[in-house]
Amino acid sequence: MDKWMKNNNFNKILALALGIILWTIVHVDTAPTYQTTVNNESKTIENVKVEIEGFDSEKYVLTKDVDSVRMEVMGKKSDLTYKFSDAYRVWLDLKDVKPGDNTLPLMYSTPSGVTLEAMVPNQVNVHIEPRTTKSFPVSLNITGEPAAGYEVGSPVIDPESVEVTLPASDLGRVAKVQGKVELEGQNETFSEKKLKLFALDSKGNELEDAVIEPSTVAVEVPVTLPSKTLPLDISFTGSLPASLVLSRVTPEQDMVTVYGSAETLKTLSSYEAVLDLSAIKNAGTEQMKLELKPPEGTGKIEPAAMTVAVFAAEITQRTLSAIPIKLEGVSSGLTARILEPGSAAMDLTLSGAPTLLDQLDQDSISVVADVGGLTAGVYDVTLQVSLPRFISLQNAASQLVAKVELVAPAAPAATAAPDSSPASSSPTPEPSAEPASVDETLVEPTPEHTTEIIEETPMPTHIPPETAEPTPPASGNNTDSTGGT
């Protein structure tokens, strides 16, 4: 390289090349710039939404006659083509506007490089009115029929009332706030956490501008079969060991609810459940599970099962003395008396749990001689003994019999009434020794005589019971009662 730099011809050539380059640079930078002509185009933007600014929608209601405008703009083709419509804005400034009627100009903005030529319309008529709030109860419009046999219960709505906000002029049009529930074919409870509400006028039309707070409610509509609450009766199957007896049976609850058709429920007065006692082997308390099945023709039962506490104890005996025999069913006009046993009372030997036997007295046991339908006479009547539950009669194998006498009252003897006619005042003639003539006419008593005899009260010829020789009273029972005890 040093060799070339020392060559005079090379240096001259290099200097010439650098000079040409410098000249070119200077002359290119100072060359005049030629202006190109830009062609602007117009474009129409339809349906530009009018936005609202500076308006307190919680306090006021706004009504305006314009929702959107048409904008005619001018700009370069590239700006008009590649600028989105969202870049064009039109708004209404309501920051300082008071309630009432106002005509206000529309504000606008366009993209860079685009100018507005025209806007139709360019102003808006607005009406501003204060909002008014009122509380309304929530109701339901329930449509459709549930499944066959099911019934719709009372709905539960939470909350039960809401607030409706409207201009004062429109709030009076609100007739009700309502949600719609469809129950067609429903066979279970309808539940909805967020049921939408609507404000309706008296014709059922929705007031769309109404602000409802809250706008939804939680709803539960019971859809169930008809039900009936029945007392629970427990019967038993199986048997306890011979040395044991029941002292108490206590279920968790003594009522059950049965669901079914209304016709079927009318026929039910109680529910009988069967408990198997064969599982009990020892005295004490046994917790047993009792399965409950719906009665025939019903849908279900609640509860379907329950626990029953069964108390068993060693069997013992106790004899109660002088339990009175009660007479029942004595026909009208008859007097009943117990001939045997002579005391009209009897002794009973009973068996059961010790705690139950200790609680017994004469008032808890009933011995009845039912003579219903019997006429006067003496009868051997089988006695009916009623005992508390879980108490049994030790000699139940043999019938208990009482001899009962039914007595009809004696018929009263008729007595002649004294003749009160005037003829009776004449002396009674002496009887004639001669026989009466065949032609002699017998005098028949007059109707007046007959009436007097009927009206005359005959004197009884029999001795009333109360004047007869008294019979020793039976212990604890009045057996000479015409109506029984």
Image: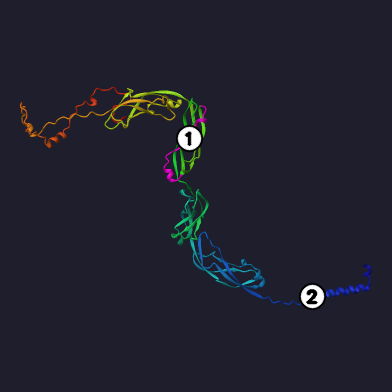
Seen in the picture, residue 315 relative to 206 is either above or below; the reply is above
- Give me the disc on residue 274: 1
The mark that comes first in sequence, 1 or 2, is: 2
The amino acid on which the numbered mark 2 sits, given as a three-letter code, is Val
Question: Looking at this view, is 390 or 401 the one in front?
Answer: 401
* Residue 340 percent across, percent down from the top left: 33, 23
Q: Give the residue at x 79% y 75%.
A: 28
Mark 1 surroundings within 10 Å by alpha-carbon count, few (fewer than 14), some (14 through 19), many (20 or more): some
Residue 267 lies within the magenta run: yes
Residue 478 visible in the shown view: no
Q: Report x, y in % for residue 48.
A: 58, 68
**Can the viewer see residue 211 in this picture?**
yes
Please indicate whether residue 129 sits to the left or right of residue 34 in the image. Answer: left
Give the Cα distance between marks 1 and 2.
Answer: 118 Å
Nearest to the observer: residue 205 or residue 341: 341
Residue depicted at x 47% and y 46%: 225
Residue ID for mark 2: 28
Q: Is residue 45 above or below residue 365?
A: below
Left or right: 56 in relation to 203: right
Quarter of the figure that contains the C terminus: top left
Choose top left, top right, bottom left or bottom right for residue 481.
top left
State the image coordinates of residue 383 (x, y, percent, origin top left): 36, 27
- Count of picture labels: 2
Q: Which residues are magenta?
A: 260-282
Q: Is residue 6 above or below residue 270?
A: below
* Residue 304 picture location, percent across and down: 50, 40
Q: Secondary structure at mark 2?
A: helix
Determine if the magenta segment contains residue 224: no
- Label 1, secondary structure: give it: strand
Mark 2 neighbour class, 10 Å CA radius: few under 14, some 14 to 19, many 20 or more: few
Q: Which mark is residue 42?
A: none
| Quarter-of-image position of residue 267 | top left
